[in-house]
Image (spheres, rainbow, N blue to C red):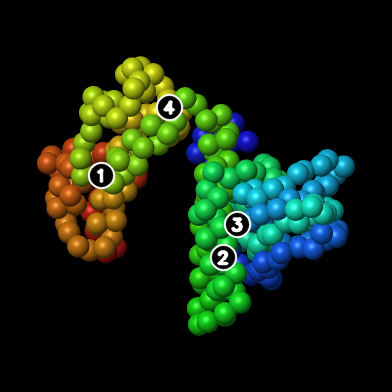
Amino acid sequence: MFQSNPNPSYDFVVTDIPFVLERRTDPDWTITVGNQSHYILAFAKSGKARYIVDNEQYDVQGGDILFFPQKLKRTAVSNPDEPWHFCSVAFGIAFLDENISAPLFSEWPLVNLSSHTNELAILFTELSLAWTGKKTGYLLKCRSLILDIIHIFINEQMIAARSNPPHFRAIEKVMHMMLENYQTTFTIEDLLSHTELSPSHFRLLFKRVAGQSITKYQNKIKINKAKDFLLSGSCNVTEAARKVGFEDVYYFSRLFKRITGVNPSSFLKKG
């Protein structure tokens, strides 16, 4: 998964939603699914079940998240001693660039133990309530919740693909700090103070996790934030540069063009 690209690009929208189902199964629960036309995500809230796909067996238990692509034939049975309680959703996807995004979905494993069990339980419960209540705007709410769930799923697959390198959490924390403090220009020493790594090891792991060097990652954050300021119409180029930590507007403009391919003033005109 994701071995050839450390930052795969997912570009799609959720379209139709045929059903959202929450169920506590009976001890004798079983199901055989043939040629379904939609993607399925399911979350095991508790209990156990067993799926058989292409003669391969998958044991499911509370906390697992399941992903089934279209046209996947499968059989499942609930554990008679601990019948499983699950929530599932079927949804369609429209890929904005099918050649890039669609193949990524075929790489996902069918059954995954999530490290975000509580968060997923809350999201699936909200999804079930929104679908059942069908208040004004419920489809928008349901699509939003499905995307939140998929986002968690994607991040977990990317982490797994990187084999969870030592100190990964420390790198992730540093990246989050850079995102939150986009107006600050961090030195390597600033960032190292939040880890127990040597400078060379830190640079190596950062690039492995972020897919780019520390400098490129930091500059990309700043320029993307400046772009938002310009498009909002809340400030001019000089003000946008200062908001993201650049006093030299000429250097800012050169960097902006290098990263985006256009001058910052072109975004200002769109605001």
Which circle's residue, 2 or 1, is located before the other in the chain? 2
Query: How much space separates mark 2 and mark 3, taking CA atoms?
Result: 27 Å
Which circle's residue, 2 or 3, is located before the other in the chain? 3
Identify the mark at residue 13; answer none if there is no mark.
none
Residue 172, how many percent across, how many down? Answer: 40, 36
Q: Which residue is mark 3?
A: 95
Which circle's residue, 3 or 1, is located before the other in the chain? 3
Q: Residue at x 55, y 55 (%)?
A: 120
Identify the mark at residue 125; answer none if there is no mark.
2
Q: Residues within 10 Å of mark 3 (few under 14, many from 20)?
A: some
Whether pointer 1 and pointer 4 mark residues with C-beta atoms closer than 8 Å, the reply is no
Q: Residues within 10 Å of mark 4 (few under 14, many from 20)?
A: some
Q: Amino acid at mark 4?
A: His
Query: How much space separates mark 1 and mark 4, taking CA atoms?
Result: 23 Å
Q: Nearer the viewer, residue 73 or 104?
A: 73
Q: Quarter holding the C terminus? A: bottom left
